[in-house]
Amino acid sequence: MYEESSLSKSRLNQLSFLFDQPPYEEPEPCEVPYIRAPYGAPHIRASYDPYIFKNIDSVCQRQPEVYTISDTSNHYKYETQIVSMLIKLLLHITLISVFETLFYFLYVSSLENNGIEYVISTFINGAIEDYYNMTSEQIIVVDNILKTYINVSDVIQKGNTEELVRYKYNNHISNIAWGYVSGLSGLFIILSVYTRMRKIKINWKHVVLENFAMVILLGLYELLFFNTIVHKYQPISTEELAQGAVEKLQTACRVLT
């Protein structure tokens, strides 16, 4: 066996001063690692977590979240644009539906009825003028002929019945039209509540004024177009009606030939 060296540890400690070296000491086991810091920065002792160092690969390979703050702002921006456009469209269609319903049932329908009554009155007035030029004997003969083919009480009763049926049917049509208005208004209210719940900012003053102005201009144009074009359109004349009636009597009944 080799003999122990004559240089003991105390002598080595004394010699270390000659070389500006620290005394000989046994190094202590390193239990806590050090983290390398940038140049000039103090060294910071990090806590050792065996789980993190054991799973360092999985930690480094973890993917970041896809849904970021910018995505949230873009989503809110698109939602605001879509809701604003739907608000404008629904309000515009709702106002137009109200105007069209009132315009037709209060104005156009009455003009249509007056136009038909005018054509019939013009056709009958010609026969009435001929009646004034007839003698009493001729009037009796014509009355007897007409009573043979026309049941006066039956015609009046059927006319009253058809008038009631027409009023009921037109009221039903009017209710359907107002049902459309109610449906559009309901959708507009639901969308307005949604904007309030989502706290979406809508310039209501601008939207309402813009749509009211558009509907008013559209209403004025339709009123002008109807009175200057549609109302002045000439339908079939009374002379043409008389011609058609005579021709049918000549063809079917062999009269007035």
Image: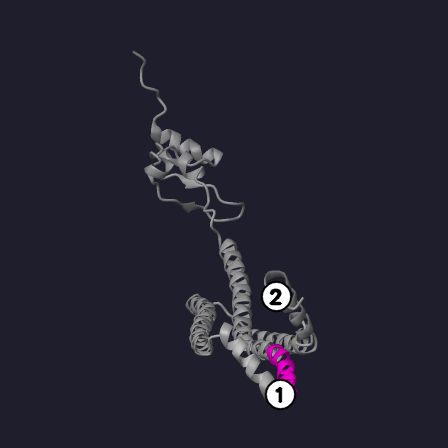
Residue 236 - label: none
Q: Distance between the residues labelled 2 and 1?
A: 25 Å
Q: Quadrant of residue 88?
A: bottom right
- Whether residue 21 is visible, yes or no, is yes
Q: Magenta includes 58? A: no
Q: Vertically, is 20 above or below 129?
A: above
Measured as percent of width and height from the top left, residue 6 is found at 35, 21
Q: Between residue 70 and residue 27, name the one nearer to us.
A: 70
Label 2: how many Cα within 10 Å (few below 14, some 14–19, many 20+): some
Q: Magenta includes 133? A: yes
Judged from this view, the residue extending furthest toward the front is: 137
Range of magenta residues:
119-135
Instruction: Give the label, 2 or 1, closer to the camera.
Output: 1
Give the SS element for disc 1: loop
- Whether residue 205 is visible, yes or no, is no
Q: Between residue 154 and residue 252, name the one nearer to us.
A: 252
Residue ID for mark 1 = 135
Residue at point 70% right, 77% down? 228
Measured as percent of width and height from the top left, residue 218 is found at 63, 74
Q: Vertically, is 185 above or below 67?
A: below
Residue at point 44% right, 71% down? 169
Q: Between residue 134 and residue 158, name the one nearer to us.
A: 134
Q: What is the total number of numbered labels drawn onto the structure image?
A: 2
